[in-house]
Image: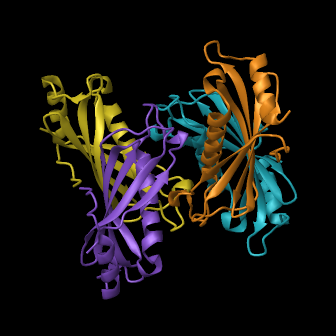
Chain colours: A cyan, B purple, C orange, D yellow
Amino acid sequence: MATQPTPKATTEIETITPRFCETDALGHINNVSYAAWLEQGRMSYFMAHLDKDRNPFMMVKIEINYRNETFHGTDVEVHTHLARLGNSSLTLSQNIYQSGNHVVESATTLVNYDFTNKCSLPFNDEQRAQLSALMGN
Amino acid sequence: MATQPTPKATTEIETITPRFCETDALGHINNVSYAAWLEQGRMSYFMAHLDKDRNPFMMVKIEINYRNETFHGTDVEVHTHLARLGNSSLTLSQNIYQSGNHVVESATTLVNYDFTNKCSLPFNDEQRAQLSALMGN
Amino acid sequence: MATQPTPKATTEIETITPRFCETDALGHINNVSYAAWLEQGRMSYFMAHLDKDRNPFMMVKIEINYRNETFHGTDVEVHTHLARLGNSSLTLSQNIYQSGNHVVESATTLVNYDFTNKCSLPFNDEQRAQLSALMGN
Amino acid sequence: MATQPTPKATTEIETITPRFCETDALGHINNVSYAAWLEQGRMSYFMAHLDKDRNPFMMVKIEINYRNETFHGTDVEVHTHLARLGNSSLTLSQNIYQSGNHVVESATTLVNYDFTNKCSLPFNDEQRAQLSALMGN
């Protein structure tokens, strides 16, 4: 599922402060909040490394593996890197850490999408070069 | 603050199922969720009783009194009625109940707003008649 | 990933009203809310069909496939059924529909967990019989 | 309602990154999120300046004035200070800023509460001295 980045891949790290309202009656952070944190990590990755106007992605799939609990009171880090580059889609791999513990692994598949004609679009040469560089190739 | 409706006022009742992710580490529903539930109650009131295209309201203030805790596992009812009609603003009064307990009182002030010219607008005669009828006058 | 239930499997249907605050700046429901809706669907399934005190499950994985957008203003239905029964884990399969459109497929893996000794537990005969019946076997 | 702190009052500033899922279909941050941000501001204030174990507060009221919209893409600052000290309750005043704009004013009333006997408690001399110092008296 989620992978660790290769040494040359570009990794974006987003620090997030868990909110008290994100805890639940079990005393830990509720699983729903991870979806919000992972979205924040992807946003940071896009803003830092991609021209979003030229890369109109549509989210089609997310997988989240819960390895450990997280708690209120300590920041978490969301690490995001590009793990797969297909013909018209890509996969961002994400890992969340709290206090050095690896708590969540996740992978999100996004499609390069033509919102006008409602169909997927193969990456063009310019996009492919930029994305390959982010993968460390 | 929040008021009980007069006998002739129109009250809209929205039933909401608390979500498990809305609990917090104290074991009850977190205070933030009430803001979401009250918005749902206002939406239902507007959709049932007002033509929103003719009534472009802007929210300027909310007050929420927490009278009792609420819990996951039992639906709540959000009761909404029009409590005040001003020159260009109005106040919706809201009360939340769970298992017959009166748990929250709230009042929201909304302004009749001209989003193009960015200024408040006095209610016209048609609006005023409609709103007065909802108050039970 | 998510499956359609076999004819004999027990399916629980939870109706959810999307909240206005669940929309995002793209005009549709934000992807994070599906995680909350799916949790509601699983809660309803558990409360209707399983004795939670005897079944202390820990969530270890979720997959969500986004097939179509959803919008504010129309209720959604979350359909939940048991799709896989392992030695000490199970998979709940979930499908979300809005206005007859199949918008989301999801699968959640839960482990039968001993929270005291922090280890997974094989299902005992009683649990296995109950769960098999829910699968329609 | 919300006040500006006096020169000697202690103000805690919490920086928050708005999340994309906090936008709504109107393109701005939804009003519900302010309740979550204000709670974060209060938590930071408590953790920085008060011994929570000795100060078991219960939230009884919040008022939020919406002065301007906020948007995704720029951090906000939540400024929190103690504005009123009563016999057994206090009021925290909060102001939110984005890009130098004063966007939200809020006031929260908290009661010094005996959760065992379910009644409010007058502040003792030690608490009163500590709280008075935070107000700048």
Residue B132, how many percent across, how many down?
29, 77
Residue B126 left/right relative to C87: left
Residue farthest to the top, as pictured: C117
Q: Quadrant of the C terminus of chain B?
A: bottom left
Which residue is at the front of the view, D80 or D65? D65
Q: Residue at x 27, y 56 (%)?
A: B2
Residue D11, how many percent across, how many down?
27, 43
Q: Indicate whether A94 appears above or below B96.
A: above
Which residue is at the front of the view, A34 or A137? A34
Residue B1, how many percent across, how many down?
23, 56
Residue D102 left/right relative to C89: left
Which residue is at the front of the view, B8 or B132? B8
Q: Quadrant of residue B3?
A: bottom left
Q: Quadrant of residue B81?
A: bottom left
Q: Is residue D9 visible?
A: yes
Q: Residue at x 48, y 57 (%)?
A: D74
Residue farthest to the bottom, as pictured: B125
Q: Indicate whether D27 appears above or below D57.
A: below
Residue B125 left/right relative to A38: left
Residue B36 left/right relative to A117: left
Residue D8, how many percent across, how many down?
17, 42
How many marks are shown on the rendered structure? 0
Q: Is residue A13 visible?
A: no
